[in-house]
Amino acid sequence: MEIMLAKTMGFCFGVNRSIQLVNKAIADGKKNIQILGPIVHNPQQIKDLEAKGVRMVDEIDRLVPGTVFVRAHGVSPDVLNELRGRKGMEVIDATCPFVKLEQDYARKLKDEGYSVVIIGERTHPEALGVQGFAEGSVIIGTAEEAKELKATPKLGVVVQTTLEPESVDKVVAELYLKAQELRVYNTICRATRERQPAAKELAQKVDLVLVVGGKNSGNTRRLAEVCARLTKTQHIETADELEKGWFKGVKSVGVTAGASTPDFVINEVLDRLKSFG
Ligand code: SF4
């Protein structure tokens, strides 16, 4: 069985940067290192950091004095100010620069009098954080939701960094009918723009694609959706989920991984695959 890898996969710049910042804080001996929300949508990476004493904290009220990280997804300005106002708390902002750009554009659009739309997932922390930069902004994910919006003279749009460009196009086409002036900042990040085409290219060449990454990771799920349109696809979090039956009659298998999937998880999958012959 031939094993092929996507040209680009695994940790993106923003996730890598945030994990490095946490590891540096550990090495510097900072006390009570906490991360507001899971630092990445990958349970294995989180377990690794927890084993080093880092705590993932879901609610601000559960933080204790020490060091708190804002993860790559970012937070709203209100949350950031609240963290900075806490006694005995050092705040390290690990928001990905690509997310910061999206936040800045949302604020600029609001300041310039646009009604702001965030094309994204309603419950995704990145989209929710960006919403805080433009009061009154709405998050929509589909062309159907765009149809429901009221017409307005000036409509400004930013895009969640990990969305698939083709699905964004459909939403924008509907928004075009809703305003006299439509301004769109395409804030899909470079990592997404590279990884999705690389996954498509891979899926066109193989009988089966394994997409490795957190089941709760939006960008990993989208890679799986992209591949599933082209060939048989399995989305797995770890090597333990691999089933021999999937490989019956399969001559070539492709492997790709989400932007939040650490190398050690990908390597375990590759090692297990090789043992299947
Ligand atoms: S997926 Fe893109 S925006 Fe998100 S952390 Fe990675 S580089 Fe940054």
Image (cartoon, rainbow, N blue to C red):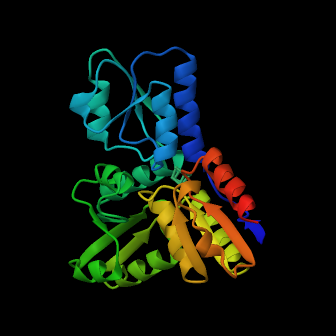
Which image quarter is the C terminus in? bottom right
**Total numbered labels placed on residues in the image:** 0
Residue at the (30%, 78%) spot, across then down: 146
Give coordinates of residue 123: x percent, y percent: 30, 59
Q: Specify whether 152 is left or right of 103.
A: left
Q: Quadrant of residue 105?
A: bottom left
Give coordinates of residue 50: x percent, y percent: 45, 31
Which image quarter is the N terminus in? bottom right
Give coordinates of residue 3: x percent, y percent: 76, 67
Residue lying at the far right in this picture: please name it. 2
Q: From the viewer's perspective, is residue 223 above or below residue 131?
A: below
Residue at the (68%, 56%) spot, across then down: 272
- Residue 217 visible from this viewpoint: yes
Which of 63 and 246 lies nearest the eye of the viewer? Answer: 246
Residue at the (55%, 55%) spot, across then down: 240
Q: Specify whether 266 is left or right of 60.
A: right
Which of 273 and 14 lies nearest the eye of the viewer? Answer: 273
Which of 85 and 273 lies nearest the eye of the viewer? Answer: 273
Residue at the (54%, 79%) spot, across then down: 228
Q: Quadrant of residue 127?
A: bottom left
Q: Specify whether 47 is left or right of 82.
A: right
Q: From the viewer's perspective, is residue 252 above or below residue 39?
A: below
Give coordinates of residue 163: x percent, y percent: 47, 67
- Residue 196 visible from this viewpoint: no
Q: From the viewer's perspective, is residue 165 above or below residue 139?
A: below
Which of 42 and 74 lies nearest the eye of the viewer? Answer: 42
Q: Specify whether 215 is left or right of 17.
A: left
